[in-house]
Image (cartoon, helix red, strand yellow):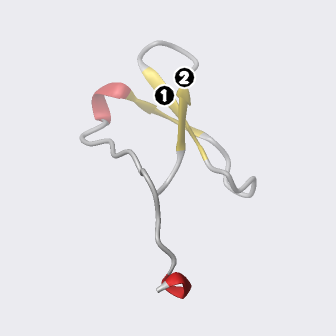
C-alpha cells in the first residue's frame, strides 16, 4: 500500500493518508512499523 506519512494525534502514532479521498486516513503505532520505504520514482509500462 502507498500512503503519505503525516504526524499522528500523539507522538507514538503516525497518520497514513491516501491521495485518493475515497480512502480515509488511519493511524498506526510507531512500534508496529517493521519497514518503511521511500519511493524515488516510477516507470510506466507505456513508456517502454
Examine the rendered structure and indicate whether residue 27 appears above or below residue 47.
above
In-image side of 10 versus 37 (left or right): right
> Going from the N terminus, do you reach mark 2 or mark 1 first?
2
Query: Looking at the image, which residue is at 46% across and 57% down?
Result: 41
- Residue tagged 1: 14
Viewer-side residue, 42 vs 27: 42
> Element at badge 2?
strand
- Residue tagged 2: 7
Query: Looking at the image, which residue is at 75% across and 53% down?
Result: 21
The outermost residue toward the front is 48
> Element at badge 1?
strand
Q: Position of residue 23 (x, y in %)?
A: 67, 54
The outermost residue toward the right is 21
Q: Which quadrant of the structure image shows residue 7?
A: top right
Query: Distance of mark 2 from mark 1, alpha carbons?
Result: 5 Å
Query: Looking at the image, which residue is at 34% across and 46% down?
Result: 37
Tell whether label 1 touches label 2 (CB within 8 Å). Answer: yes
Examine the rendered structure and indicate whether residue 29 appears above or below residue 45.
above
Q: How many marks?
A: 2
In-image side of 10 versus 12 (left or right): right
Q: Position of residue 47 (x, y in %)?
A: 53, 82
Examine the rendered structure and indicate whether residue 4 appears above or below residue 1.
above
Q: Position of residue 1 (x, y in %)?
A: 46, 58
Viewer-side residue, 30 vs 37: 37
In-image side of 46 versus 11 (left or right): right
Mark 2 Cα-neighbour bin, 10 Å: few <14, some 14–19, many ≥20: few
Mark 1 Cα-neighbour bin, 10 Å: few <14, some 14–19, many ≥20: some
Mark number displayed over residue 24: none
Amino acid at each position: 500500500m502507498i500512503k503519505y506519512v503525516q504526524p499522528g494525534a500523539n507522538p507514538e502514532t503516525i497518520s497514513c493518508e491516501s491521495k485518493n479521498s475515497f480512502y480515509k486516513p488511519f493511524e498506526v503505532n510507531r512500534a508496529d512499523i517493521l519497514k518503511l520505504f521511500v519511493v524515488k520514482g516510477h516507470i510506466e509500462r507505456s513508456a517502454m
